[in-house]
Amino acid sequence: KAKEHGRDCFQFYTSAMHEHAKARSKLEGALHKALVNRELSVVYQPIVAVDGRTFGCEALMRWHSPLLGAVSPNDFIPVSEELGLIVAMGEWVLYQACADAKNWVTQYGTDFFVTVNVSSTQFKRQDVSSLVAKVLRDTGLPAANLTIEITETVLADNSVYILQQLQTLRAMGVELAIDDFGTGYSSLSYLKRFPLTKLKIDREFIRDLPDDQEDCALVSAIISMASNLNLKVVAEGVETAEQLALLASLQCTYTQGYLHSKPLSSSEFSYYLKSSSLDCASL
Ligand code: C2E
Ligand code: MG
Ligand code: MG
Ligand code: MG
């Protein structure tokens, strides 16, 4: 009996693994063609100062596959990193984001910035600082209006090469943000070693504000530490007015989240900027 049961389990696992492998190879096959078939797009989520003015936006990749429908970046980004496809996809996003931001800077002022996520695979497989220099040249976006977002995975490599890449970007005038701060390891030493200019507090720490006392204490400590290190702070995933009020009282520089807006297409974001600057003008 036990033997039969064991065999059933074995069959169950192999067929589940088989299904998983099939789904995975379908995703891989579709992903290989996504860029050339123009299935990728970029959306922009506003980054808003405590006074309510939108100072910038984060560029986020979207994939709509005719075969699979809309696939979340949380599912396709890791696979595109493994397959090395992220290099071409990331290059494409950088071009789009800088070209769009160039227009917004021209219309809304020199303070406006766009942030672009760059993964550790991109730094490993490509000279990111040369790419950024070329894209800025081609699009005419001033370096100061671009922020590169990196996660602790990039910094954890602890290599001289990464440090040099980041120093080159900083020397050009590009800003550097540490993304998802607080979710990785030994973040504090990174803040000292790398030439960062912005810190993004992960959504996980924002979610239960203002009720969770421990999260309040952590977020408050992160904001004052960051301000002492001259880093601008972005709180991610702000969804409620109560969260925003608390973050404003803690003097968080910027907030980003569904409370202000979901990520928007380029034309929607242009419209968003137009209507929010009208709001400001009428004050
Ligand atoms: P991330 O860089 O931390 O981006 C923030 C994520 O939080 C985005 O998810 C955004 O849509 C989501 N978000 C923003 N506000 C809220 C909110 O109020 N509530 C909730 N629940 N979520 C909110 P998205 O667009 O699905 O992207 C997921 C991750 O995929 C990103 O996390 C980033 O790590 C990666 N990613 C996205 N686009 C790119 C890209 O162009 N290049 C690279 N290398 N990675 C990317
Ligand atoms: Mg990000
Ligand atoms: Mg993040
Ligand atoms: Mg993330």
Image: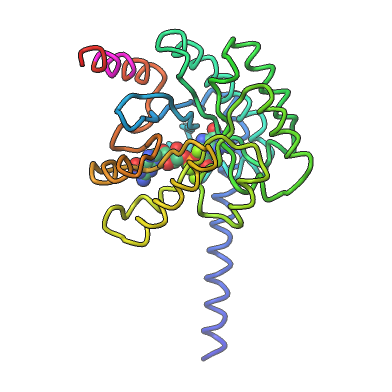
| Residue that appears at 40% across and 12% down | 108
| Dominant secondary structure (helix, strand or loop) of the stretch shown in magenta | helix
**Residue 216 locus on image (x, y percent):** 35, 55
In this view, 210 is above or below 76: below
Closest to the observer, 26 or 75: 75
Closest to the observer, 117 or 223: 223
Q: Which quarter of the rendering shows the C terminus?
A: top left
**Residue 269 locus on image (x, y percent):** 37, 20
Q: Quadrant of residue 258?
A: top left
* In magenta stretch: residue 153: no
In this view, 198 is above or below 102: below
**Residue 143 locus on image (x, y percent):** 60, 19
| Residue that appears at 68% across and 36% down | 122
* In magenta stretch: residue 276: yes
Q: Which residues are magenta?
A: 273-278
| Residue that appears at 43% across and 36% down | 70
Position of residue 224 in the picture relative to residue 10 (left or right): left
Q: Quadrant of residue 150?
A: top right
Position of residue 249 in the picture relative to residue 20 (left or right): left
In this view, 17 is above or below 180: below
Residue furthest to the front in view is: 228
Q: Does residue 30 appear in this view?
A: no
Residue furthest to the left in view is: 282
**Residue 94 locus on image (x, y percent):** 58, 24
Position of residue 84 in the picture relative to residue 104 (left or right): right
Residue furthest to the bottom in view is: 1
| Residue that appears at 57% across and 44% down | 26
Closest to the observer, 88 or 247: 247
